[in-house]
Amino acid sequence: MFSSFAHLLRLGASGCQGSSRSIATIVSGIKTSKLVRTRLKEEVETMSREFTGFRPGLTVVQVGNRDDSNLYISTKLQAAAQIGIVAKHVRLSPTATQDEVLQCVMSVNDDTSVHGLIVQLPLDHVTHIDTQLVTNAVSPLKDVDGSSPVTSCSRTGVSVAGKHAVVIGRSKIVGAPMHDLLLWSDATVTSCHSKTTDLPEQIQSKSDWWKRRLFTNRIDDEKETRRQTD
């Protein structure tokens, strides 16, 4: 996958000269993230002044102890602290039952001091747990991970209506929702993933806009950590 991206960049550099075809717009998630964090910090400070003693609360519920999940959660907790949000990490045992996980989620739903809830995926469990049942149990009023139809492209001023977008990745928490959000924003969407054989061609020939996200994922069968595309 990474060699494909390198090949794509070389093709883009060599193909720009003398070509009338439009060049795809790459939206910077890092830049957008900084803008969002700055805005949120200002909003938290304003709320704290208007409502004495108020602090927004976030809880991250984790099942198990995956290294990649621990890394993500650590990053989220650090970002929350920088913004001024009181963040809590609740880790359940890999042997936790589905009922115990659901009870934990419902308890956070009912906690008035918590305003945002994240169920860290994937669930690292040894018992049978229906992941969709657990994520659906999160209150829509506290669902941090995916109910809001706000995307990074809307914040950057990039209009995707009428454009052909290529989404690289198909995960349930990033790739698939991004596909749907772009579709609902009137874009024509192509989804690519680790089994796509002609990725550079898909991007260069079709895309006006493309999205890519990399993450560290533990491969249980190989008992090792590797980087792969979601």
Image (spheres, rainbow, N blue to C red):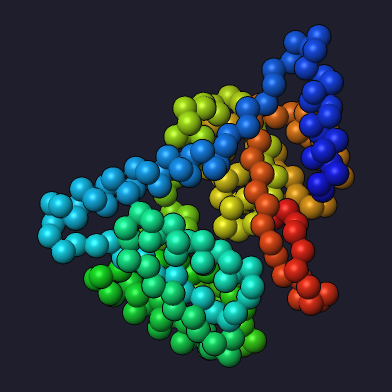
- Vertical placement of 177 versus 136: above or below? above
Between 83 and 96, the one nearer to me in the picture: 83
Locate residue 115 relative to residue 151 in the image: left or right: left
Q: Would you identify the image quadrant in which residue 20 lies?
A: top right
Please name the residue shown 37% across and 67% down the image: 87
Q: How many marks?
A: 0
Horizontal and vertical percent position of residue 209: 64, 31
Please name the residue shown 48% across and 69% down the image: 119
Q: Does residue 71 appear anywhere in the picture?
A: yes
Horizontal and vertical percent position of residue 217: 70, 65
Locate residue 75 relative to residue 203 in the image: left or right: left
Locate residue 82 relative to residue 135 in the image: left or right: left
Between 106 and 228, the one nearer to me in the picture: 228
Q: Would you identify the image quadrant in which residue 77 lies?
A: bottom left
Horizontal and vertical percent position of residue 177: 56, 50
Please name the residue shown 41% across and 81% down the image: 104
Q: Does residue 139 appear anywhere in the picture?
A: no
Q: Would you identify the image quadrant in which residue 105 lies?
A: bottom left
Between 60 and 31, the one nearer to me in the picture: 31
Locate residue 208 relative to residue 39 in the image: left or right: right
Please name the residue shown 68% across and 52% down the image: 214
Quadrant of the frame with the C terminus: bottom right
Horizontal and vertical percent position of residue 32: 49, 39
